[in-house]
Image (cartoon, rainbow, N blue to C red):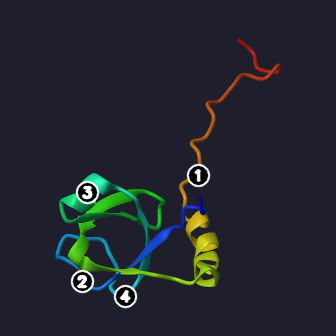
Amino acid sequence: MGEKRRRYALCVQVGIDEDLELRKVYAVRHDALAESRGHLRVVDESGEDYLYPADSFVLLDLPKDAETALRPRLKKARPKPANQPLQRTGSARR
């Protein structure tokens, strides 16, 4: 079986309350239930995914070279892990 390819979509319509950018390419996560109800699970700059109306996007069939070019930008957008809690050091006084 072949490798699972990422999906991308071009934003072609922005609603009043949506934080999307017109004509921007977004990564799309697979969500069969959302798609059956007319939505796409779109990944934003922070790496979080949100549901948006599917008719706000055109799904793109990108060549592998284009997917590879987009991947580093999207990886950088992922949120950083939370800072570790502070711990006492040996020099701390009680």
Which residue is at the front of the view, 82 or 56? 56
Comparing marks 1 and 4, which lies closer to the viewer?
4
Quarter holding residue 54: bottom left
Tell me the element at label 3: helix
Q: Is residue 78 above or below residue 45?
A: above
Image quarter where the C terminus lies is top right
3D distance between C-alphas at marks 1 and 4: 27 Å
Task: Measuring from the top left, give residue 43's x and y in whole percent.
Answer: 42, 64
Tell me if mark 3 has few (under 14), some (14-19) or many (20+) residues whose alpha carbon lies within 10 angstroms of its own: some
Residue 11 lies, in percent from the top left, at 33, 81
In this rendering, the answer to whether 51 lies above or below 61 is above
Q: Are marks 3 and 1 in contact (CB under 8 Å)?
A: no
Looking at marks 2 and 4 on the same chain, the residue that comes earlier in the sequence is marked by 2
Q: Quadrant of residue 81?
A: top right
Secondary structure beneath dot 4 equals loop
Q: Amino acid at mark 3?
A: Ala
Give the left or right position of residue 93, taking residue 9 as reference: right
Q: Which residue is mark 1?
A: 80
Q: Distance between the Cα atoms at labels 2 and 3? A: 18 Å
Identify whether 80 is placed above or below 27. Answer: above
Q: Are marks 2 and 3 in contact (CB under 8 Å)?
A: no
Spatial CA span between label 1 and label 2: 30 Å
Q: Which amino acid type is shown beneath numbered disc 2?
A: Gln
What residue would you read off at disc 2? 13
Q: State left or right for residue 45 relative to residue 90.
A: left
**Which marked residue is nearer to the observer: mark 2 or mark 3?**
3
